[in-house]
Amino acid sequence: MTYTNPPNSFVQEQLAVEEDEDSGSLVLYEKRPPQPWEQGDVREPSKIKPGEVTITYMTHACMELKFNGFTFFFDPWLTGPAFLRGWWLQHEPPSDWLQRLSKADAIYISHLHSDHLSYETLAKLLEIRKDIPIYVGDLSTPVFLRAPSHGMEGKLNINVCKFDKWVELTEDLRFMILMDGVHPAMDTCILLDYKGHFILNTVDCTCPNGARLPKNVDVMMSDFAGGASGFPMTFFGGRYTEEWKRKFIKTERQKLLQYKASVVKEVKPKLYIPFAGYFVEAHPSDKYLRDLNLKNDPNDLCALIENQCTDVKTWVPVPDRTIDLGLLLENRPFSIDPKNMSTRDYYKTSWNIAETEISLQESRNHQLFKTNDWLQTYFDWANFSNYDLVVRIMETDENFVPIFDTSRDIIVDFEANKPKILSSVPKNIANRNYLEIKARTQCFRHTILKGELWDGLYIGFQCQVSRNPDTFHFKFWDHFQIALPLEPPNWEKVLKDRKRDKSVKRDENTACVSVKSNVAAGYADLGWVKYSMLTAALAIIVVTIYRKK
């Protein structure tokens, strides 16, 4: 038997083989190797005093943890949108969030998605401090992959950590970054150890650490909401009716609740926190999404967990609500609510949508898109080929109605070893894999201009997708959402070449006009010659007649 493991993923240890003496059959079983937190310096839990360790919810997936004076932040998305303009914060973060973030001793960012890695948040942080250590996992798709396109290359104190290794922060505090079993190239989770007490944050991981997790941790937190995928929300045509989507979403949300509850039941934490799902489709153009893309209620998950796991407490976060770990361990009331804040104050009622639109409109009106000479450059730069797929991209208005003209209807064939730009859909399209993407024009052009990943279009619900046959093209979406080049395309060269070509054409036209003028002048000169010759001939005739008389 040969064991084959995906690259950069978990290694399946060779299964043990035993013969069943009664039946003569072979039995395969997996030996359970020691987990990384069970090896080396294993610390026995020691007493934590009330007030010594606190966990405060900020918003979405951002937590502020304090360990006896050491402040650790998780995934600070605290301002602006995520995924272009598709996601907006549901909860209003504390008004002093920037001051508190700037006083952090360490920051952990789980992965590159913009609801966890918010460049807009970090840009504000950089105005105050540049030296805060930011810890990320050693992923094959680097967390700060897009830092250059956001003007942050070399400006952040990024520390890349090996998986399954303790990183010491203080004498009592350390952490370990773990890999996701389903998305090992781009997702991580984190385990913190303070005086032998564990805090486990599985963030968005589908199968955190390959489902090998520590048991009986003190605090566990994970995502819960669902609704964070382009499927099926962005799909149209065929079975993807609104009724089908509603049924699918309802079923998937229930499955997610059951799965999350099963993981909690396996880990058996003292306290479970549902977080990393508090976003809303706040843009006015996305109202239909808010009505259709329903999320799980954290209270429903907590009720399910407490019903299945009677020893597990649950805690629904609101901005600035705090857990005192010392009080939790003493089995005393441990939740501290923010002062002078009513329930209605927790939820955002306005967003800086107009400010975001200014940037998108600038991309929409950029001179690059006056002609389509950028197409070949872009798709050559994207470096995706040798895949049987024809993609048609139609730029649209806010309601996904195509804006048809030659510059807004793009057809690309990826079958050969180089992408080919087509003027029309191939006649044999019925025998090909065909993907039709309708994309809001300003969002699509912004993605192209900045060389951004396409997750903003797909996960941010800024496109609609139809496919024939109805097959998920993993290679295509994985490449355009994860594997695009680090540096954006060289649009400056494209514009210079365009200007040069115009100049050459203008010179050619000028030369042509000059030749025509000279020819015309020549014809004019010939006209005068003809007139002179005619006048002379008439004079000769008159003289001849006179002489005959």
Image (spheres, helix red, strand yellow):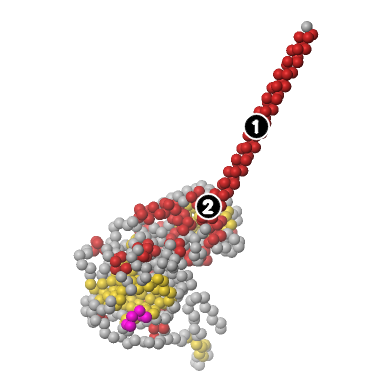
Q: In this view, does 370 lie above or below 348?
A: above
Instruction: Tell me the quadrant of the picture where the C terminus can be found.
Output: top right
Q: Earlier in the sequence, mark 2 or mark 1?
A: 2
The residue located at (59%, 46%) in the rendering is: 504
Residue 173 part of the magenta-drawn span? yes
Of the pair 366 and 77, the residue shown nearer to us: 366
Secondary element at tag 2? helix
Residue at (54% x, 59% y) in the render: 379
Q: Which residue is more in the foreground, 18 or 125?
A: 125
Residue found 23% across the figure and 68% down from its top: 338
Q: How crowded is mark 1: few (under 14 residues within 10 Å), some or many (20 or more)?
A: few
In the image: residue 143, left or right of residue 195: right
Q: Quadrant of the N terminus?
A: bottom right
Residue identifier under label 1: 520
- Cα separation, mark 2 vs mark 1, equals 37 Å
Farthest right residue in view: 548
Front one among 139 and 429: 139
Q: Where is residue 41, by image quadrant?
A: bottom left
Residue 140 percent across, percent down from the top left:
48, 72
Q: Three-letter amino acid code at disc 2? A: Leu
Above or below, 20 against 406 in this view is: below
Q: Does the magenta stretch include residue 289?
A: no
Single out the residue that lies furthest toward the bottom: 21
Helix, strand or loop at mark 1: helix
Mark linked to residue 263: none
Tell me which segment is drawn in magenta. 168-174
Where's residue 52, x and y in %?
A: 26, 79
Identify the residue position indicated by label 2 in the image.
495
Tell me if mark 2 has few (under 14), some (14-19) or many (20+) residues whose alpha carbon lies within 10 angstroms of its own: some
